[in-house]
Image: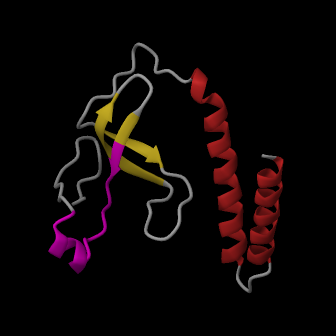
Amino acid sequence: MEEALDNAKLKMEEYYEIGKNKKYREGELTAKEYFEWIHTKTEHMIQKEKFELSDNVRIKRGEVFWVNFGYNIGDEFSGRHPAIVLKSSRTMCVVLPLSSKEPTELQKQKGNYVEINKVYNFKAIKR
């Protein structure tokens, strides 16, 4: 366990140094966002056992909420996006992120997208 932690720390420091030394501030910001997300994710994991929705909060299937998807890689969703609830319980919620981007030709061919024309209490754009 300690070896894994030491290796993770070394890799994180390496990542920060790479980002810090890039010609543009983009690399440094990426490293900063990555570290901030690790901090937030760790806090969530620490609090996981204590988490429970209060009795007056109801999350129902089909509702749309703002969700922080954190810092991710490649085409994965990052940051804050609206998401539709697919399944919900007292301790877990499965959501599908919504995007305002046009689907790619490949997504259209595969049919792995659904167009939503209106989301109640959200800006009127196609998602």
At x 71%, y 77%, the residue is: 25
Name the spot of residue 105 as percent of width and height, x first.
22, 79
Q: Which residues are magenta?
A: 95-112
- Magenta residue check for 104: yes
Check residue 111 for magenta coloring: yes
29 lies left or right of 106? right
Counting from the top left corner in percent of width and height, residue 83 is at: 34, 47
Colour approach in the figure: secondary structure
For the view shown, which residue lies furthest in the top direction? 55
The quadrant the C terminus occupies is bottom left
Q: Residue at x 16, y 55 (%)?
A: 117
Q: Residue furthest bottom?
A: 23
Dividing the picture into quadrants, the one containing residue 65 is top left
* Count of numbered circles in the view: 0
At 41% from the left and 13% from the top, the residue drawn is: 55
**Residue situated in front as seen by the camera: 127 or 39:** 39
Residue 123 location (% of width, % of height): 29, 52
* Nearer to me, 55 or 4: 4
Position of 104 relative to 36 (above/below): below
